[in-house]
Amino acid sequence: MITVILRLPIFLIFIGILVACVPMRHVEHLRPAVSGLIVEDKKPIPGVVLFLAKFPGKNQPCAEVGEVVPVSSAGIFSLAAVQEDKLTDSLINPAAVRGQLTVLCIRHPKKGVLIGVSMMMKLNNPVTLHLVCDVARPHSGGIGPHTVSTMLGQLQYCEATTN
């Protein structure tokens, strides 16, 4: 009797896993392709550092440094898209409805760490953005296409356009 009781939950868990995932080859787009310009009052900023937030879902996303984004002396930067081939997808939470948050942070030599922009994108949709970031002009409302959003109560410094 005890072995039947133990096998039933294991069997149900196994069936649940099978039902939740289906073999479906697809590409998940984990990060948008981003190019842009960072300035202060239309002038390049010597010593500025751009980086991706290590944990973008936190209230203070720029507290920990993830990948550093190179910036030219003219203030130009670019970030390659990241995508991943997958063999299975979830029936309960498919890539078509799941999203990925990416936060671009600015370390200004005098103003400290600032949120450049938070980008939310659907995993099944590739996105290319062009950003113009002016640390002299913060934004607090809508700042571009649907893939770019502001975090509650946080100023951001980049305006976005889709290419």
Image (cartoon, rainbow, N blue to C red):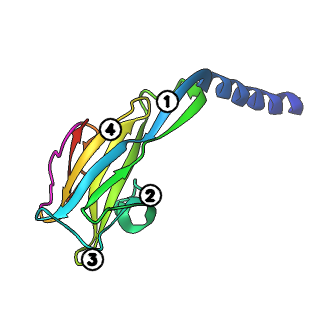
Residue reaching furthest bottom?
Answer: 110
Asked whether 88 falls inside the magenta stretch, the response is no
**Which residue matches tag 1?**
93
Q: Is residue 137 above or below residue 1?
A: below
Q: Residue at image x 26%, y 58%? A: 116
The label number, if any, that marks residue 36 in the structure image:
none
Query: Which of the 4 quarters of the picture holds residue 134?
Result: bottom left
| First in residue order: circle 1 vs circle 2 | 2
Mark 3: few, some, or many residues within 10 Å (few <14, many ≥20)?
A: few
Kindly report the distance in space between the C-alpha atoms of the residues bearing marks 1 and 2. Answer: 21 Å
Q: Nearest the camera: 6 or 76?
A: 76
Which of the 4 image quarters holds residue 98? top left
Q: Which mark is residue 128?
A: 4
Report the span colored magenta.
137-145
Cβ–Cβ under 8 Å for marks 1 and 2: no
- Position of 121 with respect to 20 (left or right) is left
**Front position in the image: 110 or 20:** 110
For residue 141: magenta? yes
Residue behind mark 3: 109
Q: Callout 3, which amino acid? A: Pro
CA separation in Å, label 3 and label 1:
42 Å
Sequence-wise, the earlier of marks 2 and 3 is 2
Front label number (2 vs 4): 4
Name the residue that disc number 2 marks: 55
Question: Label 2 is placed on what type of residue?
Answer: Phe
| Three-letter residue code for mark 1 | Asn
Q: Is residue 87 left or right of residue 4?
A: left
Percent coordinates x, y for residue 145 in the rendering: 22, 37
Q: Nearer the viewer, residue 144 or 70?
A: 70
Distance from Cα at disc 2 to Cα at disc 3: 22 Å
For mark 2, give the secondary structure. loop
